[in-house]
Image (cartoon, grey):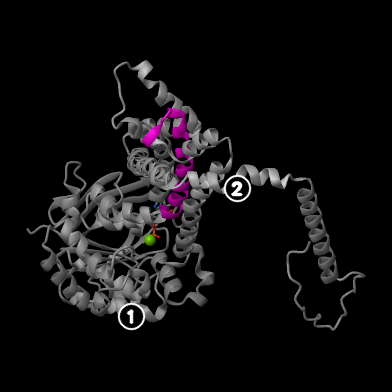
Amino acid sequence: MAAHAVEIRDLHKSFGPLEVLKGIDFTVEEGQVVCVIGPSGSGKSTLLRCVNLLEQPTRGKVTVGGVEITDPDVDIDAARRRLGMVFQSFNLFPHMSVLQNVMIAQRRVLRRGREEAERVARANLDKVGVGAKCDSYPPQLSGGQQQRVAIARALAMDPSLMLFDEPTSALDPELVGDVLSVMRDLARDGMTMLVVTHEMSFAREVADRVVFMDGGVIVEEGPPDQVIGDPQHARTRTFLKRVLDPTNAGDASAAGDEGTGEIPAV
Amino acid sequence: MTDQPMTAEPAGPAGQVPGRAKLSPRKRQRISRGIQYAILIAVIVVIAFFTNWSGLAQNFTKLDVAKQSLPDVFTVALKNTIIYTVGGFVFGSLGGLLLALMRLSSVRPYRWIATIYIEIFRGLPALLIFLLILFLPLALPGFEVPGGTYGQGILGLTIVSSAYMAETLRAGLQAVPKGQTEAARSLGMSHSRSMISVVIPQAIRIVIPPTTNQFVALLKDSSLVLFLGVSGDYVELTKFGNDLASTTSNATPILVVGLTYLLVTIPLGYLAGRLENRQGKGR
Ligand SMILES: Nc1ncnc2c1ncn2[C@@H]1O[C@H](COP(=O)(O)OP(=O)(O)O)[C@@H](O)[C@H]1O
Ligand SMILES: [Mg+2]
């Protein structure tokens, strides 16, 4: 049996007394796109950050491409090279030009020569549609352009898995589409992706599987038509109602807010 | 004194006429300003009347004495002041960066050492540190600061400035958003690589304005080299002015030296202000 692209077993994470992840199990297969949805504070970012060890899990096992990254003796820098991460707030390096942003890790981490790094950088910037902005500095770009540069920066490292943490949440509405279409293209090219998002139409269209999280556990998971189209759990329905129809969802809030107390086994 | 300029306020929607004060705020402001000018003029008149102008001129602005200070005030004294200051600044910055990184280290003893150093040398008068250096050979016979007089002066200024620079740089390092390190680490950079390529360059930009001010402070502290008993080719501005004032029994050299300090410090102060403004506007 080939290794899973990502395998998460019994993952727990606490911040002091606050238990944020309370036992997460799931896998992502090679070439799959998995979207993680759920209310704010449910632990989606923490889950994603445990996958590339920006957070150290309290308990459990995370394996990426057959390498157990929760092994205390793992070379985490080497493991992270295979993982691209895209943040909600872009996190481009403001003191470097767009081209340098995409080249720096290629040069310093992969030890690529200047010419090769520049060629790879330009190719990836073209791919995400910001090839004309090579010499600009991040603060001169729109949010949508910055996020696409951030995607190119991650892609330049030839990752085998891309992690996205609400990549469009900080964008003006009219800029969301550009970023989503880049992600759609990536998915079509067969990139393995783990995406935290509130864009339900994107999840429905692109995801192979949708995972709904609430209160630090996975409440429901399955194909998008099932989880988004025909949710089985009340908490999923409440959440979706709020996201899809925010103006009329006020009265249905009772089930969701106290949801962190007792969690039904999944 | 009213700080806010009075602008014409539209009358209330119901058309009420606001109660008319006997003295409108505008008139009151005018009277208050008139009083302030009157006080100022009175003070100037009193000072002008009681000051011994000819005595002052005799003592501070004798041209022939001022001429005596040329060109040495620039070629020796200012040059040495700059050597001491730049030396103390360069080594102080390096020491400060090391201390700042130690202070942020995950190794606890490093944090302790850095904290103790910073607390001690920020809390001591710079003069005391120079006296310490002066008496060091007594405590450690045979020990000599490398670089002779320059070495001693620069060492004193380095000890002082590294403590201040450490705190400035630590604040700068902490002001770089956490997401920057996270992005760098996510790209596979090691901790030190992300420091070198991502965090430190941004921190340096953040601390340029406060550092310029520290350079000015250090330039003034370089006058304390006077207490090391330097002489001849090693004198800096203050010592130079002091010596010349003694030999000529005239205060003019003090004025000359003071103006020479200002020649450097005022442009630097402006530069710091401009850098600060630019940083406020940029990004
Ligand atoms: N570094 C941290 N320290 C303390 N608490 C944290 C930290 N990061 C996240 N949390 C808490 O963990 C919970 C889940 O956060 P997060 O994973 O960001 O949720 P989501 O991304 O689903 O909105 C929140 O209650 C948040 O306050
Ligand atoms: Mg989040």
Labels 2 and 1 share a subunit: no
On whether residue B221 falls in the magenta region, the answer is yes
Which contiguous range is marked in magenta? Answer: B207-233
The residue sitting at 39% across, 73% down in the picture is: A171
In the displayed structure image, the side of residue A132 where residue A172 appears, left or right: right
Q: Residue A265 in the image: x percent, y percent?
A: 33, 54
Q: Residue A129 in the image: x percent, y percent?
A: 25, 79
The residue sitting at 50% across, 39% down in the picture is: B241
Q: Amino acid at mark 2?
A: Thr
Q: Residue B247 in the image: x percent, y percent?
A: 52, 33
Q: Amino acid at mark 1?
A: Gly
Q: Is residue A16 visible?
A: no
Disc 2 sits on a residue from what chain? B
Q: Label 2, label 1: how many angstroms apart (C-alpha)?
A: 74 Å
Q: Quadrant of ligand 2?
A: bottom left
Reading the image, the residue beneath label 2 is: B61
The residue sitting at 76% across, 53% down in the picture is: B44
Q: Is residue B226 visible?
A: yes
Reading the image, the residue beneath label 1 is: A177
Residue B241, disc: none
Q: Is residue A14 above or below residue A48?
A: above
In what quadrant of the picture does the N terminus of chain B appear?
bottom right
Which residue, as the protein is rendered here, is positioned at the far right?
Answer: B22
Q: Is residue A205 above or below residue A231?
A: below
